[in-house]
Amino acid sequence: MGAFFDWLPLPTGWMKADRELNKTSLKLHVAVTLLAYVMFVGWLVTGTATVGFAFLEVWWVAVIFGVLMGY
């Protein structure tokens, strides 16, 4: 169910910040998130555990950059 809610920040704007964001972390978050989505599609196509594990690792790094945007 978590993947269903991944699209919510775009139309609802719930990730909008009320203060200045760290631009470097923002750019890294966007780039790594897009890379993770590409890897997710690759995981769906191949179905291998290695690609799935790599996706989870890259996605987790994207989450960390997302958290760092506020600092």
Image (cartoon, rainbow, N blue to C red):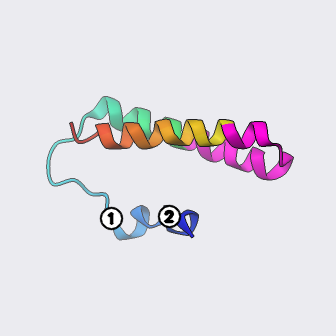
Q: Amino acid at mark 1?
A: Gly
Q: Which residues are magenta?
A: 34-53
Nearer to me, 20 or 5: 5
Q: What count of labels does the image hold? A: 2
Q: Amino acid at mark 2?
A: Trp
Whether the magenta-drawn stretch holds residue 51 is answered as: yes
- Please provide percent x and percent y for residue 20: 16, 42
x 83%, y 49%: residue? 47
- Please provide percent x and percent y for residue 54: 67, 35
Q: Is residue 1 above or below residue 53?
A: below
Relative horizontal placement of residue 26, taking residue 34 as reference (left or right): left
x 35%, y 38%: residue? 26
Nearer to me, 48 or 25: 48
Quadrant of the rendered structure where residue 48 is?
top right
Q: Residue furthest left?
A: 19
**Residue 29, numbered circle:** none
- Please provide percent x and percent y for residue 70: 23, 42
The answer for how far apart the CA atoms under marks 2 and 1 are is 10 Å
Q: Helix or strand or loop: what does disc 2 sit on?
A: helix
User: Secondary structure of the magenta portion, mostly?
Assistant: helix
Q: Helix or strand or loop: what does disc 1 sit on?
A: loop
Give the residue at mark 1. Answer: 13
x 39%, y 34%: residue? 27
Q: Residues within 10 Å of mark 1 (few under 14, many from 20)?
A: few
Give the residue at mark 2. Answer: 7
Nearer to me, 34 or 1: 1
In the picture, the quarter occupied by the N terminus is: bottom right
Q: Residues within 10 Å of mark 2 (few under 14, many from 20)?
A: few
Relative horizontal placement of residue 64, taking residue 21 as reference (left or right): right
Precedes in sequence: disc 2 or disc 1: 2
Relative horizontal placement of residue 65, taking residue 58 as reference (left or right): left
x 42%, y 32%: residue? 28
